[in-house]
């Protein structure tokens, strides 16, 4: 579905000087809006993925070989995205500095995320990445070249989940949400039972 939406987005970019539908409905703007509206302190565990999905649209090429991101992302929005990324960098960098051991899971994940968001800033700032014959392999390591290649090609990056997503924390949060749902469902069933019992009692009294 994601590839279909990006191809639709490319068609609009190729065919129209102005989009025939609201720009907010295009994937690139939907992901940008979600990235800007999500909290940065603390950020969601899935925040890295939200940004990666944004960049798969940002680097998608039209038939003219120019990146869609240059056409649909305004300079104002780009600056907002960079400011948001800097907030995320500061958040994870502080936690990385305060980690007790360089062998801990916390140390490693915050180190990885600090580097990831710094790379995302470079991706937004470097206009040469939108050139047709850009050689990603020649870029400095700070660009996270293998991940950048995946974003440009709109392909999955196998190590993304293990490198940038705290799966254990996601599983804990999912389990907590499920348990909360069970508690609310149980409370609701008990409440409905009492309501039905009370209504039946009133009907009985009214008929007697």
Image (tube, rainbow, N blue to C red):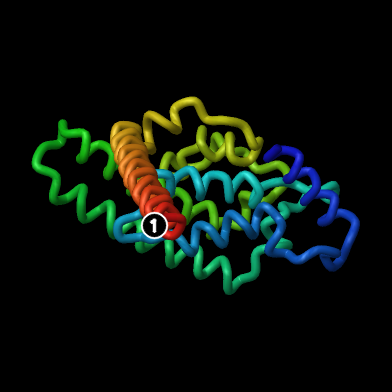
Which percent across, then down, holds residue 153?
Answer: 66, 36
Residue 4 seen from this side: yes
Residue at 64% across, 59% down: 29
Q: Quadrant of the C terminus?
A: bottom left
- Tell me the residue at 61%/71% (across/down): 75
Most distant residue in the top direction: 158
Q: Is residue 112 visible?
A: no
Q: Measured along the vertical axis of the image, is residue 180 above or below residue 85?
A: above
Label 1 belongs to which residue?
205
Quarter where residue 112 is shown:
top left
Q: Could you say which is closer to the camera, residue 155 or residue 181? A: 181
The answer to which image quadrant residue 152 occupies is top right
- Residue 134 place in picture, x, y as percent: 65, 43
- Decide if residue 192 is on the left or right side of residue 22: left
Residue furthest out toward the left: 100
Decide: few, some or many residues near mark 1? Use Cα within 10 Å; few <14, some 14-19, many ≥20: few
Counting from the top left corner in percent of width and height, residue 119 is at 44, 48
Helix, strand, or loop for circle 1? helix
Instruction: Specify whether 165 is left or right of 56.
Output: left
Q: Nearer the viewer, residue 50 or 83?
A: 50
């Amino acid at each position: 579905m994601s590839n279909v939406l990006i191809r639709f987005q490319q068609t609009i970019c190729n065919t129209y000087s102005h989009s025939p539908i609201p720009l907010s409905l295009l994937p690139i703007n939907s992901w940008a809006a979600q990235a800007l509206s999500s909290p940065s302190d603390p950020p969601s565990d899935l925040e890295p993925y939200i940004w990666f999905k944004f960049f798969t649209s940002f680097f998608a090429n039209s038939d003219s070989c120019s990146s869609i991101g240059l056409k649909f992302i305004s300079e104002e929005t780009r600056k907002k995205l960079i400011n948001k990324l800097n907030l995320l960098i500061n958040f994870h960098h502080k936690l990385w500095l305060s980690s007790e051991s360089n062998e801990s899971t916390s140390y490693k994940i915050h180190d990885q995320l600090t580097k990831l968001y710094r790379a995302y800033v470079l991706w937004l700032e470097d206009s040469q990445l939108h050139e047709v014959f850009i050689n990603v392999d020649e870029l400095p390591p700070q660009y996270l070249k293998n991940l950048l290649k995946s974003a440009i090609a709109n392909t999955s990056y196998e190590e993304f989940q293990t490198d940038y997503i705290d799966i254990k924390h996601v599983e804990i949060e999912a389990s907590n949400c499920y348990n909360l749902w069970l508690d609310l469902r149980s409370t609701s069933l008990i409440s409905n039972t009492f309501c039905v019992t009370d209504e039946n009692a009133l009907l009985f009294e009214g008929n007697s």
